[in-house]
Image (cartoon, rainbow, N blue to C red):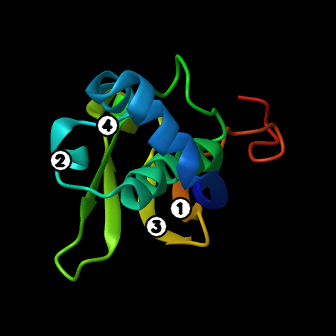
Amino acid sequence: MNADMIRVGTDLIAIRRIEAAIARFGERFLDRYLQPEEYRGKKHASLAGYWAAKEAIAKALGCGIGAELTFHDIRLHKAPGGAPSFVLSERARQRFPLLDASLSISHDGGFALAVVVLVLEVKEEKSEADDPSGY
């Protein structure tokens, strides 16, 4: 039997942190967490929003950014209507059975904020209560 699990993740970052990292490391910094198509032509506030979005997604998946899920396992883009959206890499999709998602990114007052709501498929294990015969 399968069930759905709803997970929420959020992240807040000071835009100046992204500005400082870009000033210090340049494109090398951006390449660590974004694909070129994700960062080309973007303002610092938008880049900070993308950072927050990837962190929020990782938090909602319950693993954070690391060995289980890297920054590059998450690809951000704009949906046809202009809303932020994302896709997971094949490797990440195998680990995290994502059924649906909603992502919101905002920036104001020197901060960028992202909130994500995920619907994950959860495979329930059969228990002895489901089969009282024990077979």
Find out whether the residues at labels 4 and 1 contact each other: C-beta distance under 8 Å. no
Find out whether the residues at labels 3 and 2 contact each other: C-beta distance under 8 Å. no
| Along the viewing direction, whichever of 60 and 12 lies nearer the viewer | 12
Q: CA distance from mark 3 to mark 4?
A: 17 Å
Which element is circle 3 on? strand
Instruction: Say which residue label 4 marks.
Output: 34
Of callouts 3 and 4, the N-terminal one:
4
Of callouts 4 and 1, the N-terminal one:
4
Left or right placement of residue 3 versus residue 25 in this view: right
Dot 3 crowding, Cα within 10 Å, few <14, some 14–19, many 20+: many
Residue at horizontal 65 percent and vertical 61 percent from the top: 8
**Furthest-top residue in view?**
67
Left or right placement of residue 134 versus residue 41 in this view: right
Count of marks, rendered view: 4
Instruction: Say which residue label 1 marks.
Output: 119
Residue at horizontal 59 percent and vertical 44 percent from the top: 61
Residue 132 sits in which quadrant? top right
Dot 1 crowding, Cα within 10 Å, few <14, some 14–19, many 20+: some
In front: label 3 or label 4: 4
Residue at horizontal 39 percent and vertical 22 percent from the top: 25
Q: CA distance from mark 4 to mark 2?
A: 10 Å
Q: Which mark is residue 103?
A: 3
**Furthest-front residue in view?**
23
Q: Amino acid at mark 3?
A: Leu
Q: CA distance from mark 1 to mark 3?
A: 12 Å
Which element is circle 1 on? strand
Dot 2 crowding, Cα within 10 Å, few <14, some 14–19, many 20+: few
Of callouts 3 and 2, the N-terminal one:
2
Q: Amino acid at mark 4?
A: Leu
